[in-house]
Image (cartoon, coloured by chain):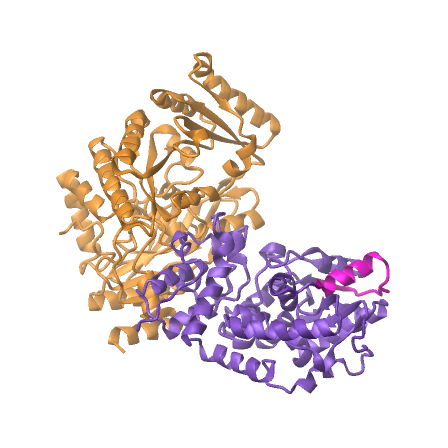
Amino acid sequence: MSDAMQALIEIVGERGVSNNPEELWFYGRDPGVLEAHRPEYVVAPRTTEEVRKIVQLANREKIPLVPMGNGMSLTGLVIPLKGGIVLDMKRMNKIVEVNAMARYAVVEGGTSQGVLKAHLERHYPNLRHSLPDAPPTTTIAANVALHGQGRLTNQYGFNSDMVTGMEIVLPTGEVCRIGSPALGPYWFSKGPTLPDLSGLFLGWLGTTGIITKLGLKLYPKKKYRDVELFVTDRVELVPDILYRLTHLEMLEDVNVWFQPKPLLFADNFHVTIYFTGDTEEEIEFKRRMIWNALQLHMDSKDGGFMSVQYMKGMLLQMPQRSIADFADVPRGGGFEYSGPITIIEHFPQYAAKVVELAAKYNVLYASSARLISGGHCMMFSISFAFNRSDPAMMQRVKHALDEAAAFSLEMGGVPWKPNFMEQKLTMERLDPQALRLMQMIKKNLDPNGIMNPGNWEVNS
Amino acid sequence: MNYVRSIKHADIVHRCFRCGYCKFPEDYSDFNCPSYKAFGWDTFSPGGRMWLIRAWLSGELPTSERFTKILYSCVACNNCKDQCVFPKFKDFLPDIFLETKAELVNEGRVPPEVRDYFKAMATSGNPYKLPQPERGKWAEGTGLPEFDGQEYLFYVGCVGSYDEVGRKMARSVGRALMDAGVSVGILGSEETCDGNEVRILGEMGLFAELAGKTIARFSERMVKKIITLDPHALNAFKNEYPELGWEFKAFHYTEVLARLVREKKIAFREYPAKVTYHDPCYLGRHNGIYGPPREILKAVPDLDLVEMDRSGPNAFCCGGGGGNFFTDILGTGEDSAARVRLREALQTGAGVVAVACPNCAKMLTDAVKTEELEDEIKVLGIAELLTHL
């Protein structure tokens, strides 16, 4: 047995560490199209103290360390590109506290979205968090670490904007609290009025530290929730539709999606509009406002509201279980998407690019955009499905995604959860002084470069 | 010559997205896959198994002790099948796990606990390695007659015949049936194993032999209708035996008792206690029987039936399915299924966990001891609640 293995067993016990071929094989890959890399160990801590000791060991021995939630970024962000330890955080899954009056929750670093949702529904039925449409096994900490979005992103911004405090194990092994919990027992602010240190960790994809606890804003859960579906075949009108809708300042969430299959949906752009209320009157008032906002496009016969009765249950589901279904359209078990953050004005160009890439690489597409912060920007997903038993198709999808990432950078977009190659492309275009600042941060926080190496390698 | 691995549904295995919906119940409140809950590695989840099976079929991963443990830690609770979000292949998940275990049996590479179980079954006809004549001892003193053309055969299975907790349950059901005037008989020492666990552990040849013997015994005794004590046996009789040419009707005892409740043929007395009911996987998820056990409990005067957080189609397994009752691959650690389930029962404030399966009864009874909760909660079969009155 290696010294490192022995040391890891001493920290987490035999049930908390594995170097069996089965775990090394599984934890070396994700469901996307990127190549697998085998770790040397997979470790599953249960406490912050265990994480601290593991990090100290890794830093001392210069062993790469990759923190992992459920591994569903699809862009290889938890593939151990340089081997080392994959740290499966999912055994740290306690909900530490819910402060109902201050509307925040404190969760451990491996707590899943589904467990928090169920906990709130059962114990705090008037509260909710911004649930992404990713599978419920995905973790809250991983979601904010990559600037994920959720159902309340249109109203309140990126899910990472909703963080209210953090406990971080730094790459050198110190445990550090960020925001109001750095001063006292309350987790109501990640930064203000202090310097906001959360930016040293959010968006860094696990390359600057490990989130072991997280405060998260909760929001009022209204009694009623409803949905309308506006459909147009004129892509150039989509930005205006979105602009008019966001002017209302009363919508929970707005998604725009288009896909070639099933045929019912082909050649149309579907704007799904979610809204909530505490009374039926409020719901009907909002419905009227939504219809009024788009009356112009109905009068010109450029679009209309589609009956949603037969798919209302599916549309209102949180998370939307049918989204994963896309992976099986080519009977194949996989899809991956590039999801640049961009301005809504560019919707038509991105939409055209999706169709162009799908035709060029002979792959199946689906696309869904989600508004962020009332329309200041949107996440535009360029998704391609593949058959996992068809390596050639996977390669075509990879090329299509590479081209999509390059396109979004040319368009002035910002890649979301970029894979390591997209990170390189991004850094090549980045303002040199911004890159230098990132280098300074990375060098000082992680002097031995152990954290998720291969990602955000600003110093290479 | 290299051994070429193959399973019937090999063309589906790559379609798993490993999204993890299969780990949860419908409301996502906790992990609902017993082996994932117990071991905590993604490899021990249904998605993990699917991905490993693919690598194993392609030869990328060899057969190993770990691989067999991962496969045999599945308790066949069917939660993954119900929660998987891929409608086109979700129904085949349990088949894929079973076919892989059958292939491991063909390779001769099963965990020692599984091997020992098969040996006992092959040599003794029961997992306890006890003589066949002892099979009928559970019924001594009950007055249950030998089957001789009665309307129903009461079939108790191996656990009901040999295990002390199972025997107690069998006796209480037998008494309840007789008290209600049901025309019923037993095979006693002539009863043979239904083979459900042998099958789910992948020994298809031995299953065929056991099932063949059982069918022959039923046929020679002219059995037309069966009441089973054990939902595992019910599952074999209803879902597997028809493929072998069986033509009898099988009911779980709770279905029969619930009918007797409706017909007012059961004399109740008060049972002033808070009781929670644990759904057995082979009764619930495998056979869709959720109502009858509750119907019986609700009919008991003063009995306060409370549900656990996870119940009905979302119930958490006790860990006794998939042969784990005999092989104990999940172990008895803090996160083992039976202990987790018992703590969940305790949270309801109930003083009694009512069960409808002898395997569940034994698993949860052992958990009461391990958790040192003897003074707070007890495990009783549904009929025991009636016959204790």
Residue name at image x 76 percent, y 80 percent = B139
Q: Is residue A276 visible in this depiction of the protein? A: yes
Q: Is residue A293 above or below residue B370?
A: above
Side (left or right) of A27 relative to B389: left
Side (left or right) of B100 relative to B291: left
Q: Is residue B324 above or below residue A450?
A: below
Percent coordinates x, y for residue A280 in the rendering: 61, 28
Percent coordinates x, y for residue B273 in the rendering: 75, 64
What shade does chain B have? Answer: purple
Percent coordinates x, y for residue B298 in the rendering: 76, 58
Is residue B256 in the magenta section?
Answer: yes
Q: Is residue A188 visible in this depiction of the protein? A: no
Residue name at image x 83 percent, y 67 percent = B182
- The span shown in magenta is B248-275
Side (left or right) of B60 relative to A152: left
Front residue of this view, candidates A348 and A215: A348
Chain with colour orange in the figure: A
Is residue B218 in the magenta section?
Answer: no
Front residue of this view, candidates B72 and B361: B72
